[in-house]
Amino acid sequence: MSKLFDGFIFDIDGTLTSTNQLIFDSFNFIANKYLGKTFTDEEIINLFGPTEDVILKEWCGEKFEAAKKDYYNYYKENHLVAQLYPGIKEILEFLKNKNYPLGIFTGKGREASMITLKYLGVEKYFDLIVTGDDVNNHKPSAEGILNFVNHFNLTPEKVLMIGDSVSDVKAAKEAGAKIASALWDSYGEEEVKTLQSDYYFYSVEELNEFLVKDT
């Protein structure tokens, strides 16, 4: 099908959508309400890996169910601050029209993932959505990428993972897939640039030009 690739996997936060600040705000809403404190962005980033529910359960214990409800209500009701990066929808439409299998692999739990994908109107583009709730081993494990590879019977090195974080790079390398590091809004840019990704893109436009040329 493609000169280089037979399938594409996207991360969500910081890759498709500008959701990072919304995530920080959502966690701090809960931290302030239930723990009487707030965290820096860096402290919240250091929590990433497990899903939101795992973090909230660790924070709130027996108040977990109430905290979980509050978290997702806040996340959903304040989603206006998080939008698709300009040009992302055009990329998804371009690849979809060429009949490539498209996937999501995110560390977010399924509930938050679907809130975001549905709110932004891009759920329909993805043939397989793998969230942190759908794997036994979260990023940087390759499990989610391999789920996609196996589901569509693809060769790993013909699959491109597009993500902004260190864990995306490590997961792709473990899977034997190619990795495109999206650096237009990456909180881990400096470390990502030390990991020898296959491709680096500093804007959505750069990624689009690459895909138009090589697909």
Image (cartoon, helix red, strand yellow):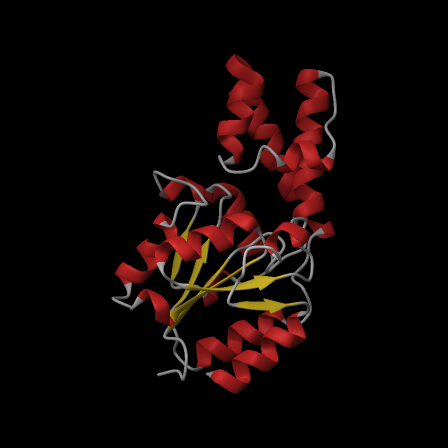
The quadrant of the picture occupied by the N terminus is: bottom left
Viewer-proximal residue among 212 and 193? 193
Answer with the quarter of the image where residue 139 lies.
top left
Residue 19 x, y percent position in the rendering: 66, 50
Residue sitting at x 42%, y 82%: 98
Position of 112 relative to 146 (above/below): above
Residue sitting at x 69%, y 44%: 22
Position of 134 relative to 205 (above/below): above
Residue 120 x, y percent position in the rendering: 60, 59
187 to the left or right of 101: right
Answer with the quarter of the image where residue 164 lies.
bottom right
Answer with the quarter of the image where residue 189 lies.
bottom right
Viewer-proximal residue among 36 and 49? 49
Viewer-proximal residue among 134 and 150? 150
Residue 201 x, y percent position in the rendering: 63, 69
Residue 77 x, y percent position in the rendering: 67, 42
Residue sitting at x 47%, y 51%: 170
Position of 150 relative to 24 (above/below): below
88 to the left or right of 147: right
Position of 33 relative to 171 (above/below): above
86 to the left or right of 9: right
